């Protein structure tokens, strides 16, 4: 069965009331403003805006504040406000024509993959190259670099369709994780041209362990994906602000700065950020929960066996008297501690 659609990690949620008040205070105390501006006067820099106009940009600044919640290193409200103004007037004035909303750039392959492996032998050409003359690509020759990539569920659907999928797809190219679940992920080898490699042709580079390779692949994916999505969202936010400012420049400052409906930025227009580390941690937590459940059940079964009624020695034949001697003088706690070390940790977690 095809997997369900994934639930993306929200990159932009509503800011707190405290954050909103901080942004309003920052704008109120911003002295780099115009008191007034006549109609059809170009706005060339942040200081050409009035306090009221900058207040009308606070909603967009909030999106920047909310957007960076998911990042390891978070910026303050004042920094996000300055970033917004910088993005707006970067190589732009109100005299410039406003371009259409920017397009989300595709992931850069193979530039965002970790180079941690090499090809053991020559690799067959990709299936989409079959109709071309049979010339072996240098990127698929023995000894050529193999780059480790992360594949999250939405990308898997884009590569292989909505399913159902043939088993060889998993067996030949993907490994690790669980790409079939809604929060699925897997590792995928690629050549220098970005084409998938079958993992049986690849080996880890000298000195690189499997763990090292996986960690590097996850970090490389998240670093590049964060940059791609954040850059795109910042461009969308700046674009919305420029549309407003262009109208304010024509209107002048006699009336309140207008924000038309088509100059607003809906939450759905902010691209969601899918981080590989979040998916891996979800899988790790699931495995920990499964492990804890199995241990609890195993422990319960063992205790039930130990506390079972003793069978009369006359009704059972033992193969060795040494077994009985070995258990003489040992209670349940002794047997459990010696046979199941985890039992001691369970009963005495501080020990």
Image (tube, grey):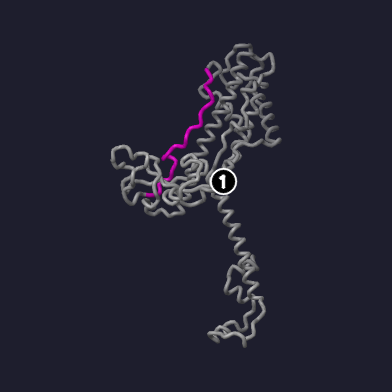
Image coords of residue 258 (percent x, y): 66, 19
Task: Give residue 198's position: percent from left, percent from top.
Answer: 39, 49
Magenta residues, as a range? 97-117
**Nearest the camera: 230 or 134?**
134
> Can residue 246 be seen by looking at this rendering?
yes
**Going 53% across and 85% down the picture, which residue do you hit?**
320
Neighbourhood count class around disc 1 (C-alpha, 10 Å): few under 14, some 14–19, many 20 upward: some
Q: Quadrant of the C terminus?
A: bottom right
Residue 205 placed where, x, y %?
A: 37, 51
Q: Is residue 107 magenta?
A: yes
Q: How many marks?
A: 1
Question: Left of 127 or right of it: where is 44?
Answer: right
Q: Circle 1 sits in a helix, a strand or a loop, which is it?
A: loop
Q: Main secondary structure of the magenta part?
A: loop
Residue 190 appears left or right of 289: left
Would you identify the image quadrant in which residue 33 lies? top right
Of all residues shown, which one is farthest toward the bottom?
314
In the image: residue 329, left or right of residue 190: right
Where does label 1 land, which residue? Answer: 182
Residue 243 sits above or below residue 129 on the image: above
Residue at position x 49%, y 46% in the image: 218
Q: Is residue 315 above or below residue 106?
A: below
Residue appearing at x 61%, y 30% in the figure: 81
């Amino acid at each position: 069965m095809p997997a369900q659609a994934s639930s993306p990690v929200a990159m932009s949620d509503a800011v707190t009331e405290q954050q909103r008040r901080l942004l309003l205070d920052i704008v109120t105390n911003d002295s780099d403003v115009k008191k007034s501006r006549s109609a059809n006067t170009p706005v060339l820099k942040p200081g050409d805006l009035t306090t009221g106009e900058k207040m009308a940009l606070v909603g967009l600044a909030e999106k920047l504040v909310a957007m960076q919640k998911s990042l390891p290193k978070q910026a303050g409200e004042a920094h996000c406000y300055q970033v917004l103004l910088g993005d707006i007037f970067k190589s732009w004035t109100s005299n410039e024509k406003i371009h259409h909303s920017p397009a989300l750039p595709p992931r850069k392959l193979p530039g965002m993959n970790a180079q941690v492996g090499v090809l053991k032998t020559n690799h067959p050409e990709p299936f989409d190259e079959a109709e071309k003359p049979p010339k072996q690509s240098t990127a698929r020759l023995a000894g050529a670099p193999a780059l480790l990539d992360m594949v999250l569920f939405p990308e898997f659907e884009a590569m292989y369709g909505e399913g159902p999928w043939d088993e060889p797809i998993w067996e030949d190219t993907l490994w690790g994780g669980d790409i079939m679940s809604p929060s699925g992920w897997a590792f995928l080898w690629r050549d220098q041209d970005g084409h998938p490699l079958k993992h049986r042709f690849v080996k880890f580079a000298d000195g690189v362990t499997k763990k090292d390779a996986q960690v590097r692949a996850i970090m490389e994916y998240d670093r590049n994906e964060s940059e791609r999505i954040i850059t795109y969202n910042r461009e969308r936010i700046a674009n919305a602000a420029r549309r407003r400012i262009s109208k304010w420049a024509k209107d002048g400052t006699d009336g309140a700065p207008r924000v038309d409906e088509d100059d607003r930025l809906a939450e759905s227009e902010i691209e969601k950020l899918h981080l590989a580390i979040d998916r891996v941690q979800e899988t790790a937590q699931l495995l920990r929960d499964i492990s804890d459940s199995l241990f609890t059940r195993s422990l319960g079964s063992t205790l039930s066996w130990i506390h079972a009624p003793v069978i009369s020695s006359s009704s059972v034949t033992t193969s060795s008297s040494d077994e009985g001697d070995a258990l003489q003088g040992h209670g349940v706690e002794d047997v459990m501690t010696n046979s199941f070390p985890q039992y001691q940790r369970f009963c005495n977690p501080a020990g």
